[in-house]
Image: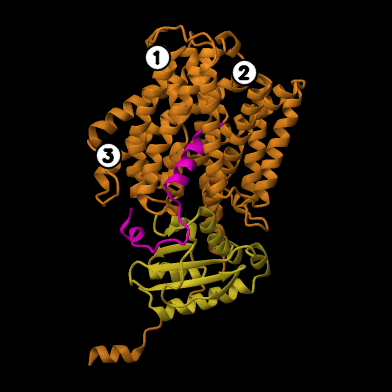
Amino acid sequence: MADWEELAEALADYTATCNDNARLRKMQKDWSKVLHFVCTDSGETFTMVVERGEILSTPQGHHGAPDLVVATTSETFCDMFWGDLNPVAKYLRGEITVKGTQEDVMRLDAISYVIWPDA
Amino acid sequence: MTEAAANLPSLRRAVGTATATATSAGLAFAAIDYLGVVSILAYAPGRSAAVAILIGGLLVCYVAAVFSELNGLYPSAAGIRLYLGRAIGNRTALAVTFTYMTTVVLVIAADAFLIGAAIRHVLHEPAVLAYLWIAILLGVALAANLAGVRLAGWMQTAVTYTVLAGTVILCVIALTKPGAAMGQPLDLFGRGTFSGIQAIAFALFLYAAFEWVTTTAEEARRPQVITRALFLAPLLIWATATVFALALSHLVPSSVLKGSAVPQLLLGTKALGTVGEVWMLGLTVLTALNTFNGGFLVASRFIYAAAREGSLPRRFALLNVRAVPWVAVTALAVLSGLVAALVFATGQWLLLVAVGATIEAGIYALGSFCLLRLRRRETRERPFRLVAAKPLASIGTVVFAVLCLATGLSDPKDPHRLSVAPLGVIALLGAAATLYVRIGLPKVQAAAAARAATARPRRRPSKVEDPSSKEQEGA
């Protein structure tokens, strides 16, 4: 089980990688969303605020009304934000649960696909 | 719904019952449904068609209950893959899902062809221009999809209710006109027992794809929203299809209907002259908005997810600058165009109806079978449970398997004869999907494994245990 420190480290790396990727920023320029994350094992929650494709913040806890909610284990979140696993495979096996439009779910996956095409 | 999913925070914007019902009805009610009614009339003329549509609707209520329970267990856009996979194994599930997705191509192709035929009919253009209309319609749909243009939820809702209400209003007007008064006796089996079964099987086709609303389960305000939509949408389709069948029998002679790809325009003309014809043309074009929007979206995202998962070649997951899986969308448009052109060249548009009806009946049989298997394996709570599931699902599996055979062996052009053409097309599609899963998929997976082996090392820093904490534990 990963603690908040590990999650924060993964999120910091993910944020920097996403925000530094010019192609991704161009692709997601019309995507402004609030994402809520729920760790099903530890109960830890955190938020990701995305404005025109740029990740602005990833605070602990839930802030604002979400457009997309993602739930899985803290370990899976860590691996996902480090780019060490393919989120679609986990999603299709029912190990990642989401609430939101198919479009937003795909956009979230597209981020991982663009920054880590090999994952 | 899983425990984790049930406790998730509420979305800022979530889909309610009216939108979900419109989505379900909109996915089911395409231009090809007008031809579906003609297919039913061939087996059950006059008022008997209404009986077939009613029985089809009652069977669909059972299907709604099955999919409500399955959706409650797996409330996900990937739901069908998940419960098929859990019930019959992942490889078989993949082959079945690929075959199932071909119905999307068939419906898109059918709509492109039918709308092209309708426009050509109204403008009195030469037949060959149908190819041009098919190309234009699919070209516009392709361009809109690649540009990331999507119908807003409210517009999709408005389009669906306009099409259904517009069809009902015109049919009611048609029924007030002097006509044939539906002289045939009310006898569903008047043309033989097998004909009655085939009429019911074709009636099922009118509701086909209503269950795709389960792919929006993740957007729903509550799980009950999808359940309500699954029961309400068939009600709307039943009402619309019934009055259309009655009005068509009332005003348009069966000899005129035979061989026509535009029965709705014939009815419009008979009811209100040119105004009626343009009215029905407008509604036919509107159905395309839902078909092209929903069809492209559902199928292309399925292909994208399959490619990302490693079940299809990676190029199908390629995204354009609008985050649209452009290879998947383009492949769908090209394939639909080829099928539409082939249908036009051969004049076999009723074969599309028969193939679609057969696949849907087969999927409903499989859905019942999945429920039977998963009842034994899944003990989790779900928001909807089918009562007497064991006997009902057992009967459902058999009934839909029989209906699958009934449409699969029907001759689309002659109700008095049997033909293996529909079943033959499905056998070809199924064989292609199975061959891919057995031969192509291992190669795709081997390539993915080879890539993974040469890929960059794991990025996540490994956990280093703090020696001081061990010392503390020891103390």
Q: Disc 3 and disc 1: Cα gap in Å?
A: 28 Å
Residue sitting at x 39%, y 17%:
B197
Mark sitting earlier along the chain (3/1): 1
The residue where tag 2 is placed is B266
Chain under disc 2: B
The C terminus of chain B sits in image quarter:
bottom left
The residue where tag 1 is placed is B196
Numbered circles on residues, count: 3
Q: Colour of chain A?
A: yellow
Q: Mark 3 belongs to which amino acid?
A: Leu
Residue B199 in sight in this render: yes
Q: Is A76 located above or below residue B424 in the figure?
A: below
What crowding class fits label 3: few (fewer than 14 Cα within 10 Å), some (14-19), or many (20 or more)?
some
Whether B147 is among the magenta residues is no
Asked which quadrant contains residue B5, the reply is: bottom left
The residue where tag 3 is placed is B386
* x, y percent for residue A80: 48, 67
Chain under disc 3: B
Q: Colour of chain B?
A: orange
Horizontally, residue A29 falls left or right of residue B444, namely right
Magenta range is: B1-30
Q: Mark 2 belongs to which amino acid?
A: Leu
